[in-house]
Image (cartoon, helix red, strand yellow):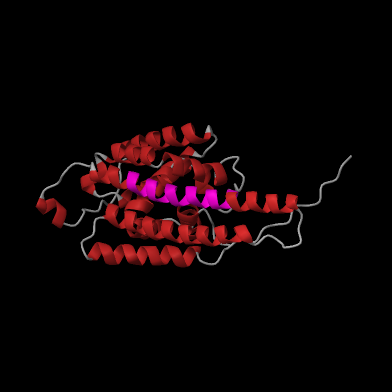
Amino acid sequence: MSHHPERRKLPLIAVYAETAANAEQRVTELLGAAGARPAEVHTLIAAIKASAVESAQGEVIELNTQAPADSSDQVHEGWLRAVETIAGRLTQIADRTVRQARAAAAVTDTRPVVTRAERTSLPTPVDSVGEDQVHQVLEAAERVFVSLTGYTGFDRDLSEEILMVVLKSVSAEQQEGYVRQLEAFAEANRERFGDLYGKYGPGGEFADESRCYLTDQPESVVVCERLDTVPMWLNAVWNDELDAELTLERFTNLWRYGLGPS
């Protein structure tokens, strides 16, 4: 019987996720106060992220000529293939980041046109969300979640409890059409959701329900939409009414960066 040596654990950058999340939130606030549309802000931030990945790819490509000098032709060939694979993967990440942001912006831009008075007035908060609205939104979220994961073992009572709170971050003006808005968002971000659940959802390679149960719950679809649309409002209602503040923080990092805080 052959014995394979234990695979070494690769070093993981786990320093900047929270800092980046706070910085993105601050930039979003500042640009929003200056009059920038949320979709435009999201696209600009995505372009900056893609540029950072592109810079990293440039440094990886430079490794193409840095194989160990005294190594064999076979080692050189393996080195080149590894560099090509990593560089290609970084290209895909940069392209996907911009593509997903543009798709999300397109969904936002196709929403119904509102009057000047509606644009300049503040959204009307709701004190509570009716059970019918919670059920309709949950059914839509379940359709998306199950289609991506095949998983039906979630806690529906927990879903309803969380949505009672999360849907308070949807203005009174948007409540009626929110299911359509959620479905459009899920369609535009289907690849992104696939990555999230494939890694951290039920049966995923890095699944850990004890650290972030939202990845096993369909209401996570709604949480993602609110994180991309009104992150400050979502944080406010969540922290005011739900105890597990770290759950939202961890899930935010998984959705935005694919990395939870240690």
The quarter of the rendered structure image containing the C terminus is bottom right
- Asked if residue 101 is among those painted magenta in the image, a careful observer would answer yes
Direction from residue 108 to residue 21 in the image, left or right: right
The residue that appears at 33% across and 47% down in the rendered structure is: 102
Give the magenta-colored segment's residue range.
85-103
Comparing 131 with 47, the one in front is 47
Above or below residue 141? Residue 59 is below
Residue 27, image x, y percentages? 33, 65
Direction from residue 135 to residue 256 in the image, left or right: right
Residue 133, image x, y percentages? 31, 38
Comparing 217 with 255, the one in front is 255
Comparing 97 with 20, the one in front is 97
Q: Quadrant of residue 189?
A: top left
Q: Quadrant of residue 179?
A: top left
The residue that appears at 48% across and 53% down in the rendered structure is: 251
Comparing 55 with 31, the one in front is 55
Q: What main secondary structure does the magenta stretch of the protein show?
A: helix
Question: Can I make out residue 152 in this image?
Answer: no
Direction from residue 131 to residue 197 in the image, left or right: right
